[in-house]
Image (tube, rainbow, N blue to C red):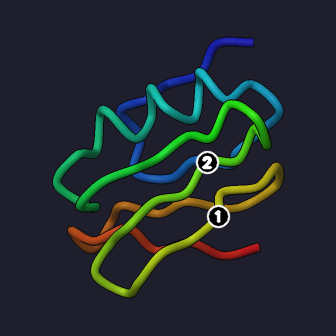
Amino acid sequence: MHKDFKLETYTADDCIADTLLWLIHHQETFDSFHFDVHTQELSVTHAAGVDIIRVGMFLNAKYGILVTSI
């Protein structure tokens, strides 16, 4: 399945590399991200705080800030 990382919305799946690629295409929407290799946990710091990105989480960059939801 082809994924378009330039789209303004994305649903995180079990491929962390794809989620990181989507985030890189939307760098203006967040301040930083951190990936812990021991726990395999990706956290993103953005205007509304810090979120742990989990499989199935909906990411939205439409408003110029990162909006996350389950």
Q: Mark 1 and mark 2 in contact (Cβ < 8 Å)?
A: yes
Question: Which residue is drawn at the image coordinates 30% and 54% (left, top)?
Answer: 32
Image quadrant holding the N terminus, namely: top right
Specify the amino acid type for callout 2.
Leu
Q: Is residue 15 above or below residue 40?
A: above
Q: What secondary structure is marked by label 1?
A: strand
User: Disc 2 designates what residue?
Assistant: 42
Using the image as rendered, state which of residue 28 and residue 7 is in the foreground. 28
When asked about the image quadrant of residue 54, the answer is bottom right
Question: Which residue is drawn at the image coordinates 56% and 71% (left, top)?
Answer: 51
Q: Is residue 10 above or below residue 18?
A: below
Tell me the tag on residue 12: none
Q: Is residue 12 above or below residue 56?
A: above
Task: Determine whether, in the image, residue 16 is placed left or right of residue 33.
Answer: right
Q: Earlier in the sequence, mark 2 or mark 1?
A: 2
Q: Is residue 65 above or below residue 21?
A: below
Image quadrant holding the C terminus, namely: bottom right
Task: Determine whether, in the image, residue 35 is placed left or right of residue 15.
Answer: left
Question: Which residue is drawn at the image coordinates 37% and 87% (left, top)?
Answer: 48
When asked about the image quadrant of residue 57, the answer is bottom right
Label 2: few (<14), some (14–19) or many (≥20) C-alpha neighbours in 10 Å: some
On the image, the x and y values in percent for residue 35 come to: 56, 40
On the image, the x and y values in percent for residue 18 come to: 59, 24
Question: Which residue is drawn at the image coordinates 23% and 61% (left, top)?
Answer: 31
Specify the amino acid type for callout 1.
Ile
User: Disc 1 designates what residue?
Assistant: 52
